[in-house]
Image (spheres, grey):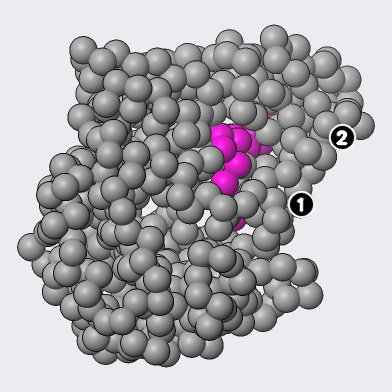
Amino acid sequence: MENPAQKLPLQIEGEVLAPASDGYDEARAVWNAMIDRRPALIARCRNSRDVASTLAYARQYDYPVSIRGGGHNVAGHAVCDDGIMIDLGNMRGVSVDPAARTARVAGGATWADVDAASQAHGLATPGGLISDTGVAGLTLSGGIGWLRSRHGLCIDNMLSVEIVTADGEIRRASEAENVDLFWAVRGGGGNFGVITEFEFRLHPLGPEVMFCAPIYALECGAEPIRAWRDFLADKSDRIGSLVEFSTVGESEDFPPESWGKQVYTIAAVYAGDAEEGERVMQPLRELAPMVTDFSGRMAYCELQKLFDELMPAGQFRCYWKSHYLSGLSDQAIDDILAGVETVPSPSTLSSIWNFGGATAQVPADATAFGDRSMPWMYSIDSVWEGAQNDAANIGWTRDFWGRMQRYSHNGRMYLNFPGQGEEGDKLLQDTFGDNYGRLREIKAKYDPDNRFRFNQNIRPLDH
Ligand SMILES: Cc1cc2nc3c(=O)[nH]c(=O)nc-3n(C[C@H](O)[C@H](O)[C@H](O)COP(=O)(O)OP(=O)(O)OC[C@H]3O[C@@H](n4cnc5c(N)ncnc54)[C@H](O)[C@@H]3O)c2cc1C
């Protein structure tokens, strides 16, 4: 290993920023305003060769490496102190093959990039709910979006990747090539290398889809939520849905008498014909008197941007945590309502998500993600302003999350909503289950020095 005191500069086709460079502070900022880390270098790569050169340099001088896709990771894993941050924000190209129904997506693309390119051909692949979230971070830990009911998680639509591993090798991984690596990146996060290109399967969809979004006052209580749960019992193969709890702001979109009040939205998307969806989901709009109703048929690309304004980048301090739930009993719904009532910040959201359908069809050992039998998830997305409010909001989230633990599906959590990952190795053991040992072996094969450790870290076997 070279002497770090006599380092040569990192040379790539893209730009390299050091702490004294113009633009350094903008480049290290991520979606969560709480995150304030200072990498030794930021490599704004243009292509896979740049990524390979940066990884060779990191190995030569023994730098740890963080990877920035869309910068949305709430725990701030995209950016590290004193290591090298590989920033893929300039690698966002998407090319669609309409005949083969596939898309090639560069490692720094956002869902807006993918949706626009695929919808130009009447096609779509499952993505997230906010259009400027990175494809890479969201997909690599599973990827949960509206189309999960019919087409599964994002990883279930991944056909291959180009990945640069810690040794600087540019490899392809698929069901036919580097099969172990392909299995690991479908759920194992950014532990195994830098994905410079994804290939996804696309499905015919839209351009119009039906979005159902009646808004009910929290005072309506548990009955509409129970009715929603029962309604979905035989429809989770077509409807991706969530009940989202929020507080109404002073917005013209809401009647003034609802401003400042707590509500829940029964949001649902029918993955199929819009007219049929409107008819099938109508009962969800008749569960109680509504505060308002945002339901309607709309272009899929419009739907995918609908919630963007609620979640602006860099403005709020955030701490998000989740449980997969083993059931949604009446008591669990009552406990959620009781917890929601005590929320300290009006910007905080929390959501009950349905699973089942295509998501549940995939065997636990087919991808690193693991068991698919959880029927529900509850995520608490705490969002607030002012560092002085950090302790109150994080404390509230942890307490509430702790009270919901008794409904947990074997201690498992969605690894894109893991708080700050404070449960450490136990969380990974519980969440990956029987897949964890194999993940540690594959990590030892491709990243024995744990160069990629700013993530839900899978320790190499024998570490
Ligand atoms: C507003 C908002 C909405 C969200 N909505 C959803 C949703 O609907 N569904 C859902 O499933 N999740 C959702 N999430 C969670 C989201 O999936 C994670 O935060 C995810 O990490 C974001 O990916 P990113 O590329 O933007 O993140 P980044 O912060 O850029 O990266 C996070 C981590 O992903 C890995 N990574 C990123 N790029 C690469 C790459 N090219 N190669 C290898 N590893 C890489 C690295 O480990 C990195 O540390 C949301 C998050 C936010 C903030």
Q: Amino acid at mark 2?
A: Pro
Residue 19's mark? 2
Residue 135 as seen in the image, left or right of residue 66: left
Residue 108 visible in the snapshot:
yes
Q: Secondary structure at mark 1?
A: loop
Mark 2 residue crowding within 10 angstroms, few (<14) / some (14–19) / many (20+) = some
Q: Main secondary structure of the magenta part?
A: loop
Find residue 13 and report its horizontal and vertical position in percent: 69, 9
Residue 203 is covered by the magenta coloring: no
Residue 67 is covered by the magenta coloring: yes
Residue 82 visible in the snapshot:
no
Q: Amino acid at mark 1?
A: Asp
Q: Earlier in the sequence, mark 2 or mark 1?
A: 2
Q: Is residue 166 above or below residue 315?
A: above
Q: Quadrant of residue 433?
A: bottom left
Q: Residue at x 56, y 66 (%)?
A: 252
Find residue 202 and report its horizontal and vertical position in percent: 25, 27
Q: Secondary structure at mark 2?
A: loop
Q: Is residue 58 above or below residue 38?
A: above
In front of the other: 297 or 77: 297
The span shown in magenta is: 62-76
Mark 1 residue crowding within 10 angstroms, few (<14) / some (14–19) / many (20+) = some
Q: Residue at x 53, y 83 (%)?
A: 257
Q: Is residue 283 above or below residue 11?
A: below
Residue 36's mark? 1
Instruction: Give the CA distance from mark 2 to mark 1.
Output: 13 Å
Q: Residue at x 67, y 45 (%)?
A: 30
